[in-house]
Structure formats: structure tokens, C-alpha cells
Amino acid sequence: MQTRQLFHGGDYNPEQWLDRPDILEQDLELMQKARVNVVTLGVFSWALLEPEEGVFRLDWLADIIHKLYERGISTILATPSAARPAWLAHKYPEVRRVRADRVRELYNRRQNYCYTSPVYREKVRRIDQELARRFGGDPAVVLWHISNELSGECHCELCQAEFRRWLQERYGSLQALNKAWNARFWSHDYTDWEQIESPAPQGENAVQGLTLDWKRFVSSRHIDFFRFERDCVRALAPQAEFTANLMYRFHDIDYHALAKELDVVSWDSYPTWHKRGETVEETALDTAMMHDLFYSLKGKPFLLMESSPSFTNWQPVSKQKKPGIAMLSALQAVAHGSDSVCYFQWRASRGAEEKLHGAVVGHDGRTDARPFRETVQVGEALEQVAQVAASGRPKQAAILHDWSNMWALEGSSGPRNAGLGYWKELAGHYNALARAGITVDLIGQESSLEGYGLVVVPMLYLIGEEFAQRLCQFVKQGGTAVVTYWTGVVDESDLCWLGDTPHGLTRMLGLRRAEIDGMYDGEERRCSPVEGAPAALPATRASVLCEVAALDEEDPAVPLLVYDEDYFAGAPAAAVHAYGEGRAYYLASRFTPEFYESFYAEAAKQAGLAPACDQELPWGVLSSRRDGFLFLQNCTEAPVTVLGCELAGWGTGVWQETENGWEKIL
Ligand code: GLA
Ligand code: ZN
């Protein structure tokens, strides 16, 4: 789906208003006012599309799709599988999910169907085919949106059987499975496939290889379900393109694997703007890391599928966006590679769970309400920078974010069960690079390292042999790697690597892990720079986990930072090692944000990475690049001057590269 425009619109749920034709009429008028050019329809329409089993009513939807299209508004059409009608759940209990404690749910909420159930798949196939037959070739439909926010897990008997089949395929024999899970421990050897059950609070939860495989299995079920629905539609609509709306810091699905099945990545972004104790700049960075992950999944523009024009109703405290933040937030998505700004939802529901969630049009229906006015402004701004659409981003730095690693890391026991703060670790590296104006991708162990100057490997506890080799190769050929503590501990089955660790990286790093100590919350060890070291780093404090490295005897790394305290005193806390044409840094612990800022300013320069903007920027101004475009965003409330122009508080400037240099287009 290549578009020469930026999409602006959002989730539209007219099925809630069919008895109010006046409101539906008003929607068309207001959408045009708000410069809406796309809506997502049908996400939760199943009960109306199929009011009784096998009875389909699609005319109302066709009517709305075409009325919108006549006014220049395209449709992203959703399949309705996320929320099944009551009649279906009542008649076929197997479609309802079974929880980890083996209790089958009653009919409730949404996104809780059994993705394995043949009955559910058959019902989904029927409705998807009806939609595909009717709208498959319709020029009004620009993209298909499969289901909604795929998530959760089902432990029913159908899923258990499927899990055993999946394991048989993965391991071939029980012998291989027992070995991979080290099942001999506590005498857990399995002697029949039927003995294997998914993890449960009252059941097995100590065989960590089993837990890891269960997570992989659940992820693969969601991907299989996506593929199933996509192919139902595709069979009748061969030209159709597909997305699924992904989520913030999401655990259940390996998005690198899911992305292979998508034509376009999209995601739902609900930053906690104005969260107590967090600056706007910090919230912006937290969101930027997600945008960058979603761009990286396919290495091409994604869609911002949902965002709130004002507030949510599900955060502990739902702060509304202060004036100007809606624009900052919208343009930030575009700056990081989104080709859309879409909202949840167009018009606020009258009742049920989300009636008090922010919407473009509120219950008062007023166009002078702030969310509506700001949506109009965003629409105008998107038209002004429309030429950004479809442009890519430069490849500079990559941070490893791998789902298997995250599952294994968090499912393990020791050396710190009080929380490892994996995302916090990623953010420490990300924020420093982003503040330095470096474009960052978030990639998995299977991703290519080609084209990057710097690859950061934070807490890659689970490391595959193949990745370790490719990382060494990358450095040998001139790349820069940054490897942190708690890397290279276990293999793909969560079996500890035997021999020196970080597995596969010790020669590249010029050191090995000798000791590791868990730290209490708030416990820190002071570290100071080594005098005369090749890189000047600031003094800092180590927390969470502290490693002591032993330098390689033949080809040692050069310490940059040493611990000052305790029996760690004098041991390297950070080191650098020249390897082939490149260099590898080792960071033995989690340090302060200021440390990462100095460290990455230096490491990025060494790696030859140029910041997005070649001029010094005031604090709080974040810069990012899309090919041919520069975005500067003022994440402070006070106006600043950048590139000779004034940027208002929370303002954004966009420049386009021309023969005569940077030309300001917004
Ligand atoms: C998610 C869902 C939407 C809605 C919003 C509310 O993103 O996809 O249906 O519930 O959250 O924030
Ligand atoms: Zn199930």
C-alpha cells in the first residue's frame, strides 16, 4: 500500500448510531471539516453483520462505505473476529477461552476467543468471506485490518492438543524435548506426549524451557490465526493488503515474526502524556522508541492506527493532552515513519466501557470543543507535509529487542527476581541515542545487521550461536557493538551455555563474565573513569546487576570505567576492545542516564554516525529524519530558536532537503 498522502482519520463505529441518521449525516460533514481521509470500519460489527447464524446483513456497511468514499474518505475495513456475537458464544462454548487455571470464561468483553477452535475458525471464515466477496474489489477499501489487537492465551483442550503437536514438530522425539527442557531436573522426564500440559498456577510452572516454548506456541497461534483470516479474505480479494494493529511494549506475540505476514505494520499508541514525575520529553522518547520498533519491523513506513485526541479512560489517571500536545504527538509519529495519524474513536459512545474515552467528536457534538479543533489543525498540518508520505529513514544504529530473549529473561529465576527492568534497560540506550539525533531501529536476532554503524545488545540473556557469529563478523568488518551485562547466558532452549560467557562474544569483547551480583532497589556502586583511557567517560553509579569481568589474557579489552566500592573495587565496569576493523564495548551494569548520554555521544561519533541536525540543539528539542526530511520537535513548554526559526512551546518544524539546502515546509 503505497500512498502519496498521509492518512488522517480513525476508528468509526457507526453501528452504534444506525437509529440516528441525523448523526450519521453530521459525521460526514464533520469528517470533511476535520480533513479526515480514512476511517477504520467494522472492527466490532459482527453482531450487526450477522445478527443470526448464517444470516448476513452488509447493506448498512456498504451504504456507509460509499457515502464516505463519495466525500473522498477511504475505508480500512476490519474483520470482526475480535468480538463475537452473544449467539455464537452461547451456542458454541468451545469458542470461549480457557484461562491458565483451566476455567472456561463466560461470554464477556472481547479478544478472548479460542484461536484454535475449528468452530470459531469456521464462523470467522464465513463472515470474512462475506466481507471479501462484497468489498474485496471495492476501490473505497484501501486496506484490510485483521481482527483487533491480537492478544492473550487460551488453555483449552483443543489448544493443549495443538501445543503437543507443535512440540512434536519442534523436537521430533520426547528424548530431544526432555533434553531441551533439562527435564531430568526434579525428575520431570516426560514419557508420553499426553503428559505435557501448558503452564498453570496450580500446575507446572518451574520447567522454564516449557514456559518459554508455551510463549512461543501462543505467539505462533496468533500468527496462524492472522494468516488464516488473511487468507480467507485473500482467496476472494487477491489484490487486498493487510495489517494488524499492534501494541505498546507488547509481550504475547513475537512481532518480528508477525510482521513477516503483514503488508503494513500499524499500531495503537496511547502515551501517558503529563504522567506525574515524567517530563513531556521523556514521554516523547518512550513513544519514539515504540514508533521506531514499528518502523523497524518491516523497515518501511507504518500506520498510527489509533491514538486519543484527548484522554483515555483506562490509565490509572487519564490526563487530557494539554493544548499543543495532540499536534506534537501526531507529528512525532510522522517524524518517526508513520504515514498516518488516526484516532480512537471518531465519535464517543453513549454507553458501556468506553463511553468516557476521548473521541474526536464528544457527546456534545460541538466543533468548537478542543479535541475537534486540534484534530482539524492536525489534518491541516498533515496536508502541508503530505510529501513526506512513503519516505523511508536512514539506517544508523540498531538496538536488539528479541521476543524469545524477553520471555526467557523474564521467566528465569535469579540473580534478581525483584524485576530486571528489561524495557528500562532498552530505554537507557535508546534515549541517549535519540537525544543525540541518531536514527535507531529495534531489531531481532534474525534481522540483518547490514547498513548499521552501531549495534547495541542490551541484556541479550538468550543468544543464538548464529547471531553471536554475525555480531562478531559485523565488528570484524568495521562495525561498533555495545554489549551489556546479562548477555549470552543461555541458548534458544534456555539451557545455560557451557564455557565462558557472554557465549560466542568473549573474543570479540576481549573479556569474560567472572561474577555477577544482584542489587536491591536503590542499591548502587560508584564507578569512576580510568585515567588515560581511550574514551573519556563520566563517573557514574551501577545498579540492578553488577558484573565483574576477567580480561582476556592474550588479547584483553581496555577498561574505561572501574568500580570504586566493595570487593568489586578496581574491576572493570566498562571496557572497549578493538576487534578486526571495528570495536566492541562492554558495559558491566546499568548506569545513570547521564552516563549513557556521554557514552553514546562518543560511541556514535567513533562509529561515524552523524546526528539528524548538524547544529547544536537546545535541551528538549528532539530531532529525527525521514529520507529527505528533517523534523525538529520542541518538547518543552518554552519557545526556542532552531535553524534560525522560532519553534513555539511543544511546536514542530519540518524541513525538506532541496538543492538550496533545507527548506522549511511546516
Ligand atoms: C485499543 C482498542 C480500541 C479501544 C482503545 C481505547 O487500542 O483497539 O478498541 O479500546 O484501545 O484506548
Ligand atoms: Zn483454545
Image (cartoon, grey):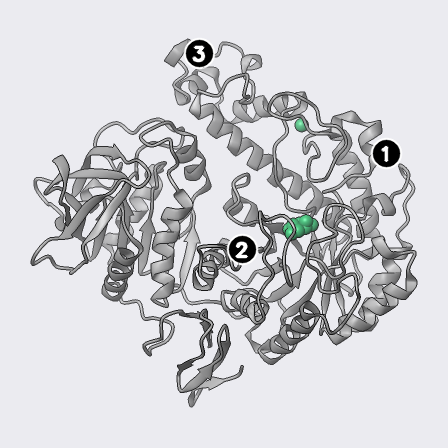
191 lies above or below 30: above
Asked whether disc 2 touches disc 3, contact meaning CB atoms under 8 Å apart, the reply is no
238 lies above or below 490: below
**Which is nearer the N-term, disc 1 or disc 3?**
1
User: How many C-alpha atoms fall within 10 Å of the one at disc 1: few (<14), some, or many (≥20)?
Assistant: some
Q: Is residue 563 left or right of residue 388?
A: left
Query: What amino acid is at disc 1?
Result: Trp
Compare residues 18 and 180 and report the one nearer the observer: 18
Q: Quadrant of the C terminus?
A: bottom right
Query: What amino acid is at disc 3?
Result: Asp
Res. 449 visible in picture: no
Disc nearest the viewer among 2 and 3: 2
Query: What amino acid is at disc 2?
Result: Thr
Where is residue 39 drawn, in percent x and y?
73, 62
Mark 1 lies on residue: 87
Helix or strand or loop: what does disc 2 sit on? loop
**Displayed quadrant of residue 51:** top right
Helix or strand or loop: what does disc 3 sit on? loop
278 lies above or below 148: below
Where is residue 161 drawn, in percent x and y?
63, 21
What mark, if any, has residue 189 been given in the picture?
Answer: 3
**Displayed quadrant of residue 321:** bottom right
Mark 2 lies on residue: 272
Q: Is residue 448 left or right of residue 539?
A: right
